[in-house]
């Protein structure tokens, strides 16, 4: 077998086993709670390997009667099981090794384990509710697609058929027949034809939902107007702070102690704020009011500095603090006092701005480290092997046409990144903080020019990079995303009315 065919075979095996890890922090195209059924075909075989116990004990039971009705359609247990299993597996794949910290034991019944998100229900009920919600949304998009005359694209049909074949091969490798696998995990009514029908609906729902999300176009005037009306949602602030606690030092304070501590903190914060005229004076005052153990820390002017703070992050801890910093009346250089339950903040607004930097468009090919079973880090030999493979792929590209299109073809053939190995390795409108550090540093290098290539290492493997171009300013991407989410949510809320849910 040639090196390229071996590579392609490993890529398929990793995808089927659910081991592919994207190089970027999770990037969702739509800001909603839907867990797309499309992933289920790829990762469902994980059940065969290690995650069967919890599923076997918790899937919906009888197949004789409808379990759910969506609109006028009766849906039976085996179909609900499909969504339950996929919802569960998506969660397990997303959280990985952290599931034990969330109280999930995959070897025990989920119906006996309390949900970490809602203590009033079990994990089984959480996954059941999520599954039914996803099922309803899928049926809604399938119905709307039919009404619009939209059918599954040839590209998605090919992907569907390939994924079904991958699943069949993985089941066969686990010494189980495909029919036995389907009936064992979903119920007697889950035949190969039924599984294909349900999976096809998932692909169509995913396709049409994406079309609905991407269809609207927004003018520059609309983007600017939305920004002007919602600046707090997009702006960032840099500020300095000093805190005076109003909590008494005594273990069992009286009402008098509490009032005295509050009065002192209020008085001190007012005096400090009154003495601040600029950033330098704020730093001087902070050193003066700091206790002896902290004075040395405040001699560093950046010790009290917070940068790139958003309104949402600040309001999560104190709405009053966020409101003061983001007030439309606030000007750079303002100093003031904000009261909280535990004391008083002296705040100095250093800067307020939006993300004016340009996003970047890039293609990449990920060569994963071939880790040993149960290993979390690659050995030096495994890293060297991955680097050699990456260098060979890059050299093959350079010795060929050496165009963006030829790079995209190699990405589709060789990349281990499941998030981009069907679209030529392309990530558009990449913003700072989205990708892993080395990937981002290379991409946002000030000297970067279209057509640049290189290889960078990340915790996942080696990335063969191809720089495409600058994208729009990041703040415009943020605004357009917000507009799309609003329009998408409005669409789905209206469409849902035609597909009422009834659980039996």
Image: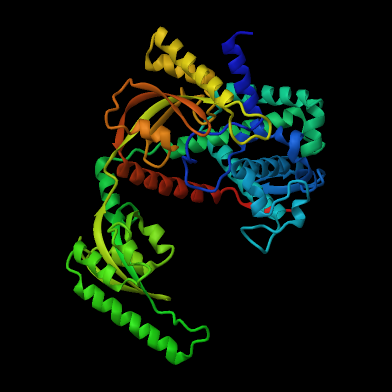
Residue 472 visible, this angle: yes
- The front one of 296 and 341 is 296
Give the residue at x 26% y 50%. Answer: 225
Q: Is residue 376 left or right of residue 318?
A: right
Q: Is residue 250 above or below residue 47?
A: below
The residue lying furthest to the left in this view is 277
What x and y, as percent, mark residue 124?
A: 72, 52
Name the foreground residue: 321 vs 171.
321
Q: In the rendered view of the protein, which quadrant contains the N terminus? A: top right
Q: In this view, does 292 lie above or below 135?
A: below
Q: Where is residue 290 in the image (x, y as percent from the top left)?
A: 32, 71
Image position, residue 229 (x, y; %): 28, 55
The image quadrant of residue 374 is: top right
Near-viewer residue (357 or 138):
357
Which residue is found at the position 64% from the left and 51% from the top? 501
Query: Could you say which quadrant of the image residue 467 lies in?
Result: top left
Residue 490 or 398: which is nearer the viewer? 398
């Amino acid at each position: 077998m040639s090196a390229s065919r071996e590579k392609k075979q490993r890529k398929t095996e990793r995808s089927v086993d659910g081991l592919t890890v994207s190089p970027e922090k999770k990037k969702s195209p739509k800001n909603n709670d839907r867990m797309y059924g499309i992933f289920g075909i790829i990762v469902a075989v994980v059940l065969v390997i290690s995650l069967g116990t919890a599923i076997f004990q918790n899937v919906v039971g009888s197949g004789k009667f409808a379990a759910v009705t969506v609109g006028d359609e009766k849906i039976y247990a085996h179909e609900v099981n499909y969504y339950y299993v996929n919802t569960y597996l998506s969660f397990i794949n997303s959280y990985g090794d952290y599931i034990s910290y969330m109280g999930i034991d995959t070897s025990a019944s989920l119906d006996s384990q309390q949900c970490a998100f809602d203590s009033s229900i079990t994990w089984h009920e959480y996954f059941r509710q999520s599954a039914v919600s996803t099922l309803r949304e899928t049926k809604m998009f399938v119905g709307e697609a039919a009404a619009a005359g939209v059918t599954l694209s040839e590209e998605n049909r090919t992907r569907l058929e390939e994924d079904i074949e991958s699943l069949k091969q993985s089941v066969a490798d686990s010494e189980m027949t495909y029919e036995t696998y389907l009936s064992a995990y979903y119920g007697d009514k889950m035949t190969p034809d039924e599984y294909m029908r349900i999976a096809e609906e998932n692909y169509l729902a995913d396709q049409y939902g994406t079309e609905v999300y991407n269809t609207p176009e927004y003018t520059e005037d609309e983007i600017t107007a939305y920004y002007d009306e919602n600046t707090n949602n997009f702006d960032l602030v840099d500020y300095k702070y000093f805190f005076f606690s109003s909590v008494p030092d005594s273990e069992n304070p009286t009402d008098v102690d509490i009032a005295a501590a509050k009065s002192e903190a209020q008085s001190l914060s007012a005096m400090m704020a009154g003495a601040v005229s600029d950033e330098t004076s704020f730093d001087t005052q902070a050193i003066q009011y700091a206790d002896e153990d902290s004075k040395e820390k405040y001699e560093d002017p950046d010790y009290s500095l917070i940068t790139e703070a958003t309104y949402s992050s600040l309001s999560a801890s104190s709405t009053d603090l966020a409101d003061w910093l983001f007030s439309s009346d606030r000007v750079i250089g303002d100093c003031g006092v904000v009261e909280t339950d535990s004391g008083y903040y002296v705040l100095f607004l250093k800067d307020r701005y939006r993300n004016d930097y340009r996003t970047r468009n890039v293609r990449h090919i990920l060569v994963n480290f071939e880790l040993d079973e149960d290993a979390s880090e690659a050995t030096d030999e495994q890293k060297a092997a991955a680097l050699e493979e990456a260098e060979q792929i890059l050299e093959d590209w350079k010795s060929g046409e050496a165009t963006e299109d030829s790079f995209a073809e190699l990405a589709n053939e060789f990349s281990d990144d499941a998030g981009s190995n069907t679209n030529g390795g392309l990530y558009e409108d990449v913003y700072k903080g989205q990708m892993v550090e080395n990937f981002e540093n290379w991409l946002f290098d000030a000297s970067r020019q279209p057509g640049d290539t290189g290889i960078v290492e990340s915790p996942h493997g080696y990335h063969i990079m191809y720089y495409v171009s600058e994208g729009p300013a990041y703040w415009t991407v943020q605004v357009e995303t917000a507009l799309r989410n609003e329009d998408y949510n409005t669409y789905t809320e209206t469409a849902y009315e035609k597909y009422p849910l009834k659980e039996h």
